Image (cartoon, rainbow, N blue to C red):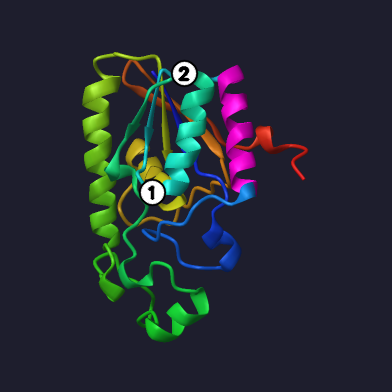
């Protein structure tokens, strides 16, 4: 089975330098163009049979365009939402630094500073989704290819689930606007075929 892991297009929070997380900002006009180009590229090269998406509107809108372009049904999946950043959601980054300064040494895996989801809780949510997804779609071999449309933070957690990395590690997996990762699970073996592909954005002004 193949899994397309896709980040949403540019959102309004990106332009305003705000903490996004659970703040539900829409796509910008550029973000919509990015999502349309993504959808056309995926339709041509890696059409999915099902699209699962975060319920936050920047991901939902991206997934909706993908679903319409490919004809794949769209299911909303709350577990694919971005990190719950509590009181940071929607704040400009400079304001957040003043109101909620990080403790010495930075945020710890168990910290819930500013009423956030801890990193341990975030990873647990990703692991719970991955276990459920695996047993509903991968192991029964129900489908050949599924697309997951989510967010940068959650995609990092899903990478760690897929690669069976520890909760605390130094690896970070970059994903640009509408970046696409392709994973394959076959005979119990897991492979990353490519990561953060953005060929569809070539030539975008």
Residue at point 35% right, 56% down?
83
Q: Residue furthest bottom?
A: 98
Q: Does the magenta stretch include residue 48?
A: no
Residue named by callout 2:
71
- 70 horizontally vs 104: left or right: right
Residues drawn in magenta:
30-45
Work out whether mark 1 precedes mark 2 in sequence or the reverse, and give the earlier one. Answer: 1
Please identify the dominant SS of the magenta region: helix
The quadrant the N terminus occupies is top left
Q: Mark 1, residues whose alpha carbon is within 10 Å: few (<14), some, or many (≥20)?
A: many
Q: At 43% across and 78% down in the image, what residue appears?
A: 96
Residue density around tag 2, few if under 14, some if 14–19, many if 20 or more, within 10 Å: some
Residue topped by disc 1: 56
Residue 126 is left or right of residue 34, and the answer is left
Can I make out residue 192 in this image?
Answer: no
Of residue 114 and residue 161, the one placed in the foreground of this image is: 114
Q: Nearer the viewer, residue 131 or 17?
A: 17
Tell me where residue 195 appears, x and y as whole percent.
55, 36
Residue 38 drawn at (x, y percent): 59, 32
Residue pictured at 25% horizontal, 38% vertical: 129
């Amino acid at each position: 089975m193949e899994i397309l892991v896709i980040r949403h297009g540019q959102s309004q929070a990106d332009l305003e330098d705000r903490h996004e997380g659970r703040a539900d900002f829409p796509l910008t006009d550029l973000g919509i163009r990015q999502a349309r180009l993504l959808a056309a590229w995926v339709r041509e090269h890696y059409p999915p049979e099902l699209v699962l998406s975060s319920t936050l509107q920047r991901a939902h809108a991206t997934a909706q365009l993908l679903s319409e372009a490919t004809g794949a049904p769209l299911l909303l999946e709350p577990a694919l939402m971005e990190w719950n950043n509590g009181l940071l959601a929607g704040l400009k980054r400079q304001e957040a630094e003043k109101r909620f300064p990080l403790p010495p040494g930075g945020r710890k895996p168990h910290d819930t500073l500013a009423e956030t989801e801890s990193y341990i809780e975030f990873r647990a949510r990703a692991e719970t989704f991955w276990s459920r997804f695996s047993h509903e779609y991968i192991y029964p071999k129900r489908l050949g290819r599924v697309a997951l449309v989510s967010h940068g933070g959650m995609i990092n957690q899903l990478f760690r689930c897929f690669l069976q990395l520890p909760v605390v590690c130094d690896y970070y997996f970059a994903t640009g606007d509408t970046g696409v990762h392709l994973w394959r699970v076959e005979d119990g073996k897991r492979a990353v075929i490519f990561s953060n592909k953005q060929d569809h954005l070539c030539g975008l002004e």
